[in-house]
Amino acid sequence: MKNKLLLALLLFVVTACQPKPGFINHPQPNLSITFNAVPDAAVLGCDEIQSPSALLGGLDPSHPIAICIINFNPDQAQPEIEAGQFIYATGGLFTTYLRYVILRDGQQVVIKTADEFRNIYAPIESPEEALSYALALRNLGAYYNLQKDPAYKYEVNEIEDTHVVSEADGYRLNLYSYQFFGCGPHWTSVVELKVAFDGIITEVSGTPVFRDPNMDGLCVD
């Protein structure tokens, strides 16, 4: 009995001394986009036009694409925004709404909803397209070359870079979300998604993985 207790204690000490978490790295896809600046954003109902991440370059068809930013204005009626005519919203007290502008057949087309986006880009036919599609429709990020930071606190034993796995009915991938707004702790979480061939995105799981303890007392509006 005594030997078993000593063995259990030894295993606990050895396990506790092992460096955690382990990291699994994947190469970042070599993608690029075509971005055409729009001279008059207001004509398209945008407050600002931005260039998207190159990681949206896997979308097919490969229309030139830009981000249409709409800022919440409490002093101005915004019936389309109130009706949900946007891809997603971000921000704290001052909300920002996101749409896309593409150049199709020589015409600038504003994509106002996820359903409109899906009608243009589905079916999803490659891992690269699944990554670009998910990033376009969800307020999430792709993380690569993740490494241990001694200042961070970790909640899991293993952290894996963003990567896409092909499955029988679509693609499974992991993206990351950082809780910037609100009060701490400000977690970075891994979010596992399923992108079906028809463009339907399902969130499979979300797990907090690490945080910076120095940010625990910070509140961001």
Image: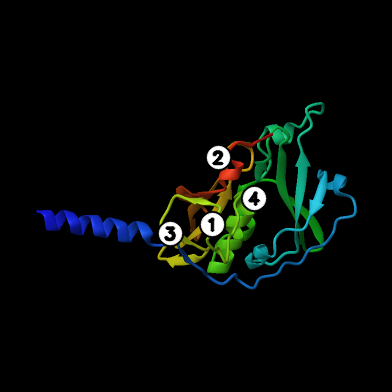
* Amino acid bearing label 1: Pro
Quarter of the image for residue 50 reads bottom right
Q: How crowded is mark 3: few (under 14 residues within 10 Å), some or many (20 or more)?
A: some
- The CA span between labels 3 and 4 is 43 Å
Mark 4 vs 2, N-terminal side? 4
The residue that label 4 is drawn on is 116
Q: Front-most of 8 and 74? A: 8
Mark 1 vs 2, N-terminal side? 1
- The CA span between labels 1 and 2 is 17 Å
Q: Which of marks 4 and 2 is in front?
A: 2
Report x, y in % for residue 1.
9, 53
* Amino acid bearing label 2: Pro
- The CA span between labels 1 and 4 is 44 Å
The residue that label 1 is drawn on is 150
Q: Nearer the viewer, mark 3 or mark 4?
A: 3
* Amino acid bearing label 4: Glu
The residue that label 3 is drawn on is 20
- The CA span between labels 2 and 3 is 20 Å
* Amino acid bearing label 3: Lys
Q: Which of marks 2 and 3 is in front?
A: 3
Which residue is located at x 89 percent, y 50 percent?
40
Element carrying mark 1: loop
